[in-house]
Structures are given as structure tokens and as C-alpha cells.
Amino acid sequence: MNEQLQFAVEALKERFGGVEKIFRGDVEVILTPESIVPACQTLRDEFDFEMLVDVTAVDYWPQEEPRFHVVYRIRSLKHNLIIGLRVPVDGDNPAVSTIEGVYPNANWFEREVYDMFGIRFEGHSDLRRILMPYEWVGHPLRKDYPLGYEEVQFTFNFDEINVRKPFARRVNKK
């Protein structure tokens, strides 16, 4: 790992209790929802991570706690580095603070995550749907979102759903 990146990761671990994860050369730090804004400020102001590349989310349903992770990718153009931040959030009422004040381009990324996953960003200046129509009910990228008015089928509930399907549409499990 690059020395500059290691300094940034160590600072996040010491100051915010972050947990470092490295997978195939990509470095991520898992943080609490309360520490995401100060962690981003630290990365921007002290370690030259001046560009927010992406904000997205992951739904780990049917795992209940934590169901969602909000994932941030932040780049340092000066040092040619990327760091990932991951924030686990509760599945019942998912919310995390906005980082719009640190990285203004987070506005659209956070609106997309809200629209697709239903994760609220507290303090956001204009949190409303960006991709789906305003009257749309639900959040299409959640794993429990019904597709085509049929219950979502996975390996853990295959037999239960397959029994309810009409005979002509039943699928053989192999």
C-alpha cells in the first residue's frame, strides 16, 4: 500500500475507530454513520482527497443487521490514490448524514441512493427522487422489491416460492 494512503487509513482508524479492509488491492475503511462527515473532511483537508468519485449502497437482505452499507469512493488526484469508505446503516430506518458540505457533487449521488435504496441523507439540501417518477412507490434496488408482481426468489426461499407457481411455470432446481 502506498505510504500516503497508509497515513490516511491509520488516521481514520485512530480518530474515528475505522476498520481497515483490503480486497484485491482496494482499500476500504468501515466507519460509523456519525463519523462519515468528519472522516471526509479529514481526507479532504489533511490528505488531499479532493474528489468524490461515487456514492452507492449495498443491500445485504435477508441479513437484518446491518442490512445496508453506504459506499463512498474518494480520489486524490495529487497522489493518484483512491480510498473507499463504507458505512453500515440500520435496515428499519436507514439514514446517514450528508457529505454535501464536504463534497458538493454528493448531492446527485445521494439523491440516487435515496431513490433506489430508500436510504435518507440527513441534512441534504434537496432529497427527492432523481430517477423514478415522484409518485413511484418503493425503492427498486432493494432486494425485497417485487419484480413483475412476483415475490423475489433466491436460493434460500426457492422451494417455498416454487410450490406456489402454476404447474407450467415451475422450475426444476438443479
Image (cartoon, rainbow, N blue to C red):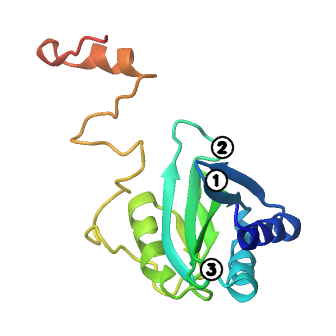
- Cα distance between the residues tagged 2 and 3: 36 Å
Front residue of this view, candidates 43 and 159: 43
Q: Amino acid at mark 3?
A: His
Q: Amino acid at mark 1?
A: Asp
In the displayed structure, does residue 150 sit left or right of residue 96? left
Q: Residue furthest left?
A: 168
Quadrant in the picture for residue 153: top left
Residue sitting at 56 percent across and 67 percent down? 72
Q: Position of residue 113 (x, y in %)?
A: 45, 66
Q: Dot 3 surroundings within 10 Å: few (below 14), some, or many (20 or more)?
A: few
In the structure shown, which secondary structural element does the residue marked by tag 3 occupy? loop
Which residue corresponds to mark 2?
65
**Residue at horizontal 33%, vertical 75%?**
130
Residue tagged by mark 3? Answer: 79
Q: Position of residue 162 (x, y in %)?
A: 29, 17
Quick check: 14 above or below 164?
below
Q: Nearer the viewer, residue 136 or 64?
A: 64
Q: Nearer the viewer, residue 34 or 161?
A: 34
Residue drawn 82% across the image and 63% down it: 13
159 up-or-down from 107: above or below:
above
Give me the C-alpha separation between circle 1 and circle 3: 34 Å
